[in-house]
Amino acid sequence: MNKDTLTFAVILSLIDFFLSMVMITGIGLVLRLLPLLNRLGKLDEESMRRGH
Amino acid sequence: MFLDETLKFFGALAAQTGLANLWWGNVVMIALGIGMILLAVTKKYEPLLLVGIGFSCIMSNVPGSDLILPGGLFTYAYKGVQLLILPPLIFFGVGAMTDFGPMIANPKLVILGAAAHLGIFVALIGAKLLGFTIYQAGAIGIIGGADGPMAVFMAVKLAPELLPQISVAAYSYMALMPLIQPPVMKLLTTKAERKIRMKQLRTVSRVERIAFPIIIGVIVNLLLPPVAPLITMLMLGNLFKEVLVTSRLAKTAANEVMNVVIVLLTVAIGSTMQAEKFLTGSTLEVVALGLVAFLFGTGSGVVGAKIMNLFLKEKINPLLGSAGIASVPIAARVSHNVALEDDPDNFLIYHAMGPNLAGVFGTALSGGIMLALLQ
């Protein structure tokens, strides 16, 4: 398909906008699951701050 | 005869100086460079960017200067842009000074980071209608993402001949957001909507803060390799910050590295603003399309938040939607200030940082998908 056309620009825009919404929603879902990592335990921030 | 010879000698001498090649375009661009420096110094508009860009713009328009000739000093700064080394290093510094807590604490708002990017595609289609190639239109559209390094990245990849116009438009509009966004935000919201207060965000643990950059880095490298350099360096900087044991590296990234890269980037951008390339009709078109992109992006973010409210029990303040434009933290600050006008006790800044930071990913995703489809 010839990419340098108005039709391709419109199709590209629709696909890009839709896919970026889907991907960022996926990132949102991953962030929703992040609190589950807290079950692994807590980190000692004081000793971490005393690092290099 | 002696006089003739003397006059011929001085004539030949003058002809090989830059003065003989000076034209009105150089004078205009030198004046523009001086204007940028004045704006930076007197109005404090983005001084870290405008002083360097303004100065190198002036020097690049002095004819005869070999700073911009092959092998000239400024060309080495431009190499850093051309080879896509400088934009990821900017993101490295940004990651080291960014707190992604607001974004992690309220994940449902990240969708506004994509909703506010409709402006990218309105500008892309507008650019195609004006006769730009699809590659140029893509690079122009990304101005609407309000992300300077991303705009530079996409311009180098898709339309390096438009780099000066795109970078100047992107950084100028970012500084002008407090003027551009509020009228659109007020037009699309009611007073009652602007007064909606947000619930306090939960505390994000250290484990989550450390896992976040690693997980996001893997996801972006898996799904969108074209923009992996930018997001990977953003996440590396953030990881240095969040693990706490590498605080000196985080401080270096956020300060010394950022400062050096800003100097090189601004010199590189200014050095491309030569009159022959900049004073064209397409410059005005790029500037106009950039404004269109920002206006539509602001509007689509606010409308996106209002659409979300149709499905949410606990309504979100729709002013957070316009913060989905990536300009961190300017867009978040604008949302906060507009909310304060109707309710002086409604502090939205921390909430607005969530979609604002998500906007960085939104721009990267939009750009990465565009590169994947075009290249």
Image (tube, helix red, strand yellow):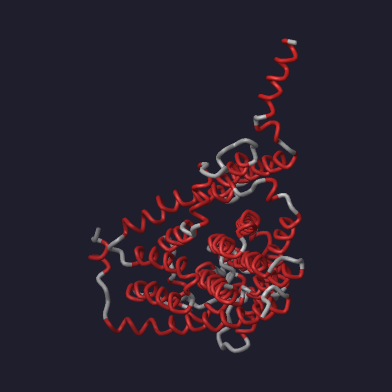
At a point 46% along the width and 85% down the height, the residue shown is A29
Whether residue B155 is visible? yes
* Residue furthest to the front: B1
Left or right: where B333 falls relative to B282 = left
Where in the figure is residue B142, as x and y percent of width and height? Answer: 61, 67
At a point 47% along the width and 66% down the height, the residue shown is B230
Q: Quadrant of the N terminus of chain B?
A: top right
Where in the figure is residue A32, as x and y percent of width and height? Answer: 43, 83
Whether residue B263 is visible? no
In the foreground, B1 or B108: B1
Where in the figure is residue B238, as x and y percent of width and height? Answer: 39, 65
At a point 55% along the width and 84% down the height, the residue shown is A22
Q: How many marks?
A: 0
Q: Quadrant of the C terminus of chain B?
A: bottom right
Where in the figure is residue B203, as x and y percent of width and height? Answer: 39, 75
* Depicted B240 relative to depicted B314: above or below: above
In the foreground, B92 or A41: B92
In the foreground, B258 or B181: B258
* Depicted B249 relative to depicted B204: above or below: above
Left or right: where B72 falls relative to B260 = right
Q: Quadrant of residue B369?
A: bottom right
At a point 43% along the width and 78% down the height, the residue shown is B222
* Depicted B313 relative to depicted B279: above or below: below
Q: Quadrant of residue B187?
A: bottom right
